[in-house]
Amino acid sequence: MDPSKTKSLRLYHLWKGNNKFVCGGRLVFGPDAGSLFLTSFLIGGPAVAFCLKIIMILKRDLEFYIPVLIGALTLLIMDFTFLVLTSGRDPGIIARNKNPPDPEDVGEVCSSSLEWVNSKIGNIKLPRTKDIVMNGQTIKVKFCDTCLLYRPPRASHCSICNNCVHKFDHHCPWVGQCIGLRNYPFFICFIASSTVLCIYVFVFSWINMLRQKGKLTSIIASDILSDVLIVYCFIAVWFVGGLTVFHLYLISTNQTTYENFRYRYDKKENPFRKDIITNFKEVFFSKIPPSAIDFRGWVADDVRIMVDESEIDESFMTTKERFDVEIGGGGKHGKDGSMRIVDYSNVEDNLKRKAGQEVVAFDPFFMTPDDHLTKDKRRQ
């Protein structure tokens, strides 16, 4: 290989996931990022129409409507800011292994596991699951055939983005991105601000009509825009408001959507659950770890090279999150000199593996009838 071309590409050019990268790899989107246009229209359309309505009636009462207009614009800007922060950042993608871990490095495994990994890694045989102990409880962790690693607790492989994501919550089609460790707080702020914006437009559209002179029935019949905004926000608030309440419940019980849909803690204690205040602090006041992968890092012009130690920020490997660095014959590196990052995931789900990937949990308030039917069958 020509030495002058050995570092001609950045990592995001070679990344095997289905992500879309913008601004030279600074922004990371999911493969369905086009849905952001629809989401932006559903949020921005009514809000902008409301602001234009307020501007047209400013002369009626300048002192009253100026604060109303400022409040609407502030909520709209906040909502779109949280939307971009949710959809345009790395949700917590876990670095793939170039090679699978050595069997002797796996350690003690669950004696009841009879399933072995042998479909994609040649003659090497690894147990499909292994046990780790967290907070005094034994947790089974699963091997990912695609990323060639054992996933960390609460991580899962998203079949849409084709990545393992740390503390995977769900893949949200409305923001076109996985929701995970690094963007979950922004996702909560996004749906909460959307809820507040809906309530704000709904209330002040009513107030605007009530402040007009004349019979209310005549005003309702003549003010078509306010009528549409009231009906639209009344319907929308049940979706975004319900989703917000659901996620506040998940935060209070320290669950993810993925875990809740799999009935992960119905028959056993949640090892991650703390008191409510601590659970909320963990989401909103804990420092968000840096990305484990430097997508803008220069790498050799070789599609087999997915990550090396220069592309991994080891500050991401906190004891709290319990990343396990597999040690090969070269100490910190594997026998081939590559960095081996091994992660774990809860595996007590009843879904069958299809083509080596898992089914992804979506927003609970946007499930199709088929999704509910599948969930009911799993419960039976």
Image (tube, rainbow, N blue to C red):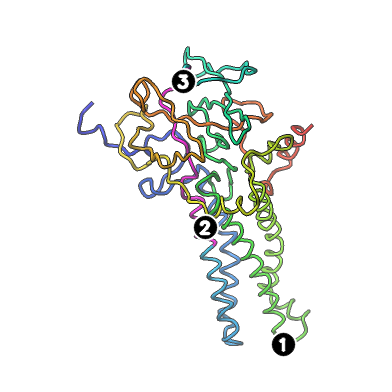
Q: In terms of secondary structure, where does tag 2 sit?
A: helix
**Quick check: 128 left or right of 331?**
right
Whether residue 159 is visible here, answered yes or no, is: no
Give the residues drawn in magenta, as a range: 79-103
- Which badge, 3 or 2, comes first in the chain's sequence? 2
In the depicted view, which residue is nearer to us: 102 or 371? 102
Report the residue marked by disc 3: 105
Query: Looking at the image, is mark 2 or mark 1 nearer the viewer?
Result: 2
In the image, what residue type sits under mark 3? Asp
Give me the residue at 62% from left, 29% from top.
138
Q: Position of residue 148 (x, y in %)?
A: 48, 26
Q: Position of residue 96 (x, y in %)?
A: 44, 31
* Distance in Å between CA atoms under marks 3 and 2: 42 Å
Whether residue 320 is visible here, answered yes or no, is: yes
In the image, what residue type sits under mark 1? Lys
**Quick check: 131 left or right of 232?**
left
In the image, what residue type sits under mark 2? Phe
Report the residue marked by disc 1: 213
